[in-house]
Image (tube, helix red, strand yellow):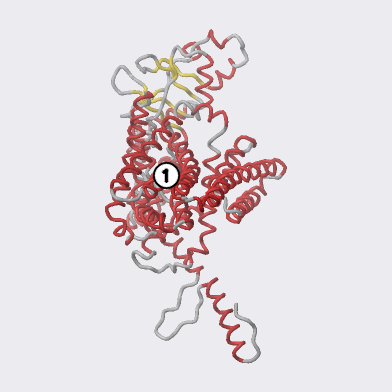
Amino acid sequence: MGSFLIGDAGVVEVAADAAAMLSHGESIVATSLGQAEPIHIATTVGLLLASSLLAGLASEMLRLPKVTAYLIAGLLLGPSVFDVIPHEHHQFLEPLTKLAMALVLFYLGTLFPFDQMRRIRKKAIPLSAGEMFFTALFVTVGIYLLGMSPAQSALLGTLAIATAPATTMFVLRETNAEGPVTSLTGTLVTLNNLVAVVAFELVWLGIELATASDAQSLSVGATLMRLVRSLGGAFSLGLIGGLVMSYACEIMHTRRWLVLLVGMASLLLGLSESWSLPYMLVFLVVGVVVVNSSSGTQKITAQLDSIGGLLTVVFFSVHGSELDLSLLADVGVIGAGYVVLRSVGKVFGIWVVASRTGASPEIRTWLGPALLAQAGVAISLSATATSRNPDIAGHVQTIVLGTVVVFEIFGPLLTRAAVLRSGEMPIANSIHHTFGTPLSALRNVFTRLAGSAGLLNKKTALSERMRVEQVMRRSVEGIAENADFNEVVHFVEHSHDNTFPVVDDDRCVVGLIRFDLLNQAFFDPTSDHLVRAGDLATPPDLLLYPSQPVRAAVDLFRQTSDDCVAVVTDEAPHRLIATVRRSDLTSLLIRDRKAGLGGSESSE
């Protein structure tokens, strides 16, 4: 800011400084003749939201993940195509994008109650360790052989571990996927980013130790202290923030939770930035603390969902507008090598460990591809490294920024394909959409009008056109017929259903266990080792076949209060292959009715 001077010159200088401040905040700058006037930041937000809305509608027709659509919408507005978003606006939108990322990491932390962490030790931790080890190894060695220095190769190997949490989790929630691959994907994403943050600091410490001279020993010691302060401070702040959040939710009415949660998240984010703590680690810890100290974790995440949708759109559209396709040419062969080596490392690492631990073919084949998206965490860590030593990390940051374009465009597609191919996403979610072409939408309006007036016969209901195989979930595990009571209880505790098929050694359904009947056996202390699953099961009177029309499932659910029905093969022996959920069927019929094609389903 210029000094205040007596006379016209002082007035001019002060006025110029004031105008510069206003320009910095609102992009309203003095323009000369022939120079276009910059757009206001509110216009930028409006353009990003409007383009994302149109891209979301287009994704319905093209059957793309909405994440990819939002990224492409931002990409079109960014420097690579139309270049209508001023670069300085990203600085003012950064708090919103970081808040969105923070809430995603908080949600990931809530997936780790202590009892679940004890359960995942035998399955998730070996898979995560193998995937991270091979990814870091392949990238570090491969990039070194392509000509980069050992320090740069080690940094890229560490950054390759990170998986984009916001991108991956948004795709999983959008597809309504559920099953072993989906569950392990969320767990491994959390572990990946947690290890990436810690490993980055350790690798950087190693780089400084390797390059330090005697005169620099003090700076190495300072680096070690910074590491302890950064990680310890993040864990401490997350612990305190999580406890405060849980306690405040206990004493406040739920109507005030949204303000509380957003305020706490903003405060923790601000403190993390002010104290130079890794906010990603802070919010992971907050989520873990909240899920283990609060009785209302689901209500808390539901409250955040009310603003999460808007923040998600802003996050991905802004992130897309920052992508620069020209960087793809700059990274060259090393960038291409990084993409291939990171992808192979994750897929191969999962395949090796899953093969040795006896994991299912779906996990062995599809868990690796579900983890390929990469963005925010890697970008943030590479920027941190560049600020510490541009000579070592400058080229590393360029490679990360260039390859993010590939991982963020194709990563969501692979995640979606993984849960679909593994049978954890109903096929109907990928082929049935609420939005058709503009012509079909107009036709639906007049069809409904004419049908209501009795001038036209209503169209064939969706429940007659679709088959059970298009709405069933293939990721299903039955209870073994000879399982004891404790094994049955363990299965029930980790299921979202209230009806559980019992299968023999050939996976043929021999009975059904219903929760309301099972609940009566909880009070018999002698049943733990004497009672078997087959003793608790009732005859399998309600079953579906893949070739049946969805109408058969609708009629079947009218006869029972079960929330799911087992699906068995059409041919004998009728083996268990999937389940149909009442909630999936109801959602499908509601979407059909909204689209104007399910008039005959009004009773549903």
Q: Disc 1 marks which residue? A: 158
* Number of numbered markers: 1
Residue type for callout 1 = Thr
Q: Position of residue 99 (x, y in %)?
A: 54, 53
Q: Position of residue 437 (x, y in %)?
A: 33, 55
Q: Do we see residue 218 in this rendering?
A: yes
Q: Is 505 in front, or is 263?
A: 263
Callout 1 crowding tier (Cα within 10 Å): few <14, some 14–19, many ≥20: many
Q: Vertically, is 551 above or below 13?
A: above
Q: Do we see residue 593 in this rendering?
A: no
Q: Residue furthest front?
A: 214
SS at circle 1: helix
Q: Residue at x 34, y 15 (%)?
A: 506
Q: Residue furthest bottom?
A: 7
Q: Is 409 in front, or is 190?
A: 190
Q: Vertically, is 387 above or below 237?
A: below
Q: Is 112 in front, or is 453?
A: 112
